[in-house]
Amino acid sequence: MNRRRFLQSVAAASLAPAARAADAQRVIDTHTHFYDPSRPQGVPWPGKNTPLYRTVLPADWLAVAAPHGIRETVVVEASPWVEDNQWVLDLAAKEKSIVGLVGNLDPNDDAFAANLKRFSANPLFRGVRWRADLVRIDQNRERVLAGARQLAERGLSLDLNGPATALAHAERLAAEVPDLRIIINHLGASGDPRALRPEWQPAIRSIARRPNVFMKVSALVEQVPGAKGDAPGDVEYYRPILDTLWDSFGEDRLIYGSNWPVSDRGAPYEVVIRLVRDYFGALGAEASDKYFQGNARTAYRWVERA
């Protein structure tokens, strides 16, 4: 038995009674990253000599997620290498825990349309993500709009990841392509819960008026400066962020994502899931169920696996 299968079996065997009870609620983790620096070609991300620079595959994620009743994930591709989209799809063919892939394709690439057609032929390919450091949606507007419309035509989604100052551009895109489901990543870059970026709350309230925009409650613990794996585990610390998102987006457009393994820089997975279970569980069973899986189905149209 190889290391990852061993980890997976240990995770399944270690389920405590409380974890088995939590398993009654289905949870889709819509933000994980898998990669393998040991490949001959290596990886463009994460960088060498960082804690993230290690092989991270589904069995590694299941080792930390399965004890909390979580066994399904939508993978978000951080690599800008086109063929790494295929690498994850090949991985998903063997790993039934992967229920969708948010790929990485640049609308400024002349091959964007051809690549989108190629990858979307696989039903597990659910959309793409444009990271602000790779794709500026306020520039090259014709190509950005063309790419967004192609996603909408294929029934795919668009993840956007960038600073709070980019939310206004995301709102404009949502208005221009109203049939496109847009998922804002990582809280829209709120900043420290006790020192929110001044532009964040007004921008959140404004973009939430667009019905085709969803918010991924991910990277919560990473917003704490200098946490180094020891971010606060009390939900009250994060209430300024969570209350703003709940008041703005309501129960139908908030989605769970861990951002694992990057989330380890803020706190262990058990803290990440406990924080949002505490918050959304207090809002009632219906709101909690929508947050943990129902809204993700609407936004991503993830795939049921055997």
Image: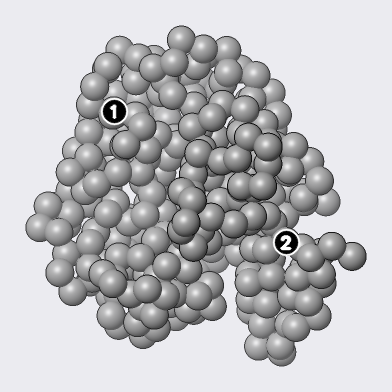
Q: In this view, does 263 lie to the left or right of 161?
A: right
Residue found at x 24% / y 59%: 190
Q: Looking at the rendered structure, which numbered label has been put on residue 137?
A: 1
216, 37: nearer the viewer? 37
Above or below, 116 against 22 in this view is above
Q: In this view, does 296 lie to the left or right of 211?
A: right
Q: What is the quadrant of residue 121 in the picture?
A: top right
**Residue located beneath label 2 in the image:** 59
Residue 176: mark in rendering = none
Work out whether 67 lies above or below 248: below
* Residue 301 shows up from this direction: no
What x and y, as percent, mark residue 116? 56, 20
Q: Residue 14: image x %, image y %? A: 75, 83
Determine whether, in the image, residue 121 is placed left or right of residue 169.
right
- In the image, what residue type sits under mark 1? Ile
Query: Toward which corner of the image does residue 230 lie, by quadrant?
Result: bottom left
Q: Where is residue 245 in the image (x, y as percent from the top left)?
A: 29, 61
Taking the spot 24% from the left edge, 46% from the top edge, the residue there is 163
Note whether 132 is above or below 46 in the view shown.
above
